[in-house]
Amino acid sequence: MILHELIDYETLRLIWWLLLGVLLIAFATTGGFDLGVGTLLPFVARTDTERRVAINTIGATWEGNQVWLILGGGAIFAAWPPLYAVSFSGFYLAMFAILFALILRPVGFKYRSKRESASWRSGWDWALFVGGFVPSLIFGVAVGNVLQGVPFRFADDMRIFYEGSFFALLNPYALLCGLLSLAMLTMHGAAWLVLKSSGPVAVRARTYGSIAALAVIVLFALGGLFLWIGVGGYRITSDISPIGPSNPLLKTVALEKGAWLTNYAAHSWMIIAPVLGFVGAALAFIAMRVRREVMTLLFSKVAIFGIISTVGLSMFPFILPSSLDPRSSLTVWDASSSHMTLFIMLVVTVIFLPIIFAYTAWVYKVLWGKVDEKSITDKNSHAY
């Protein structure tokens, strides 16, 4: 037996679909609070010292949190090449906007305190706000467009044609999903500030985080409602082999109203995901109000897990549907790399992913504790 045949092709495809979800959730629950803190910066901190407190709650860990974003992009490139090709070309301008915003963050962290000028520091603080707000919004807008279908098609020779535009991405449902993403990560950033800061910053973070948690509940409900009554979903209408070739043109697909909800009727256990989204946000709100700092962050993570899982389970087996030519839609069963490639990548992942989890946990343990004004104003500190 050839070594890679120890795990069949269908199982490998399913494993890599799950791993992609793990990487996305890991980024949202770690890098997500970095983005949330940046979004909240103008609102929770009013003096230079308070802004430095907020910034330094994430200053020691934000770079390490980006590893999940890099791993997610790498996994898409290696495990799902057609997905990488379509998404990175079709969403080019949107991704450029995200990249520009993310580049502002390291520059802002490093340079804002290099001069005593109030206008200099204020300018970089607004750059940090942009670096948190823009990615938080656009990530959700992208998901909203994926749920509606992306205007691409494959020619018979598998060339990709994308016929959308940047402004077409900013449609009402996508913006609703963008606001949900923004509220979700703002809630998560507030939960982190409540845990890691003290004084006025923590008090204001609790207020804004409570509002964001309620917004998550309302927007998540609206998103599901419109998905049921107003946004068409996709359904495979022909046979498709889980171990077949990676050629999306070998199937037929229909666009139907409410199709994204059919998985819940077929597999009732999937309802756990949206329930966790609602319950996690509700409990995060309650924990903020009763000042349970660790539980606030934990419940915020539960909400993120539930919301992202809801999207993945609703769409399965689709990973990128096509509104232009439904049969070109990419699914778990026809958009992956080869059997051997997926197996080799899985072996590498099994070795290195636990190492990443271990050193990440160690870093958070070492850097545990609150950031206060005394630690910021200490001349011997290395604070931003």
Image: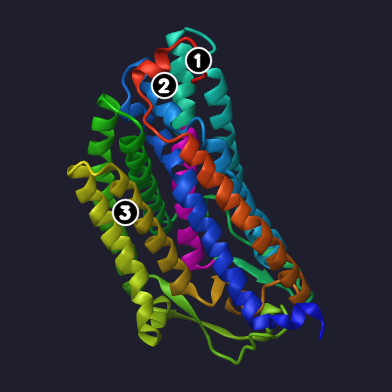
Mark 1 vs mark 3, CA separation in Å: 34 Å
Disc 2 marks a residue whose amino acid type is Arg
Please name the amino acid that badge 1 sits on: Ser
Question: In this view of the protein, which residue sits in the foreground, 324 or 114?
Answer: 114
- Please provide percent x and percent y for residue 342: 71, 70
Q: CA distance from mark 2 to mark 1?
A: 9 Å
Residue 2 image position (x, y, % from top left): 82, 82
Task: Identify the image quadrant of residue 341.
Answer: bottom right
Residue range (magenta): 130-149
| CB-based contact (under 8 Å), mark 1 and mark 3 | no
- Residue 223 in which image quadrant: bottom left
Is 281 positioned to the left or the right of 97 in the image? left
Location of the N terminus (image quadrant): bottom right
Label for residue 299? 3
Q: Which residue is mark 2?
A: 52
Estimate how packed mark 1 is, as few (under 14), some (14 to 19) or many (20 or more) residues with alpha carbons within 10 Å: some
Taking the spot 39% from the left edge, 33% from the top edge, the residue there is 369
Q: In the rendered structure, are the residues bearing label 2 and label 1 in contact, judged by CB atoms less than 8 Å apart?
A: yes
Q: Residue at x 32, y 64 (%)?
A: 276
* Position above or below: 96 against 83: above
Residue 113: numbered disc: 1
Callout 3: SS:
helix
Q: Are marks 3 and 2 in contact (CB under 8 Å)?
A: no
Q: Main secondary structure of the magenta part?
A: helix
Closer to the N terminus: mark 3 or mark 2?
2
In this view of the protein, can residue 72 be seen by the observer?
A: no
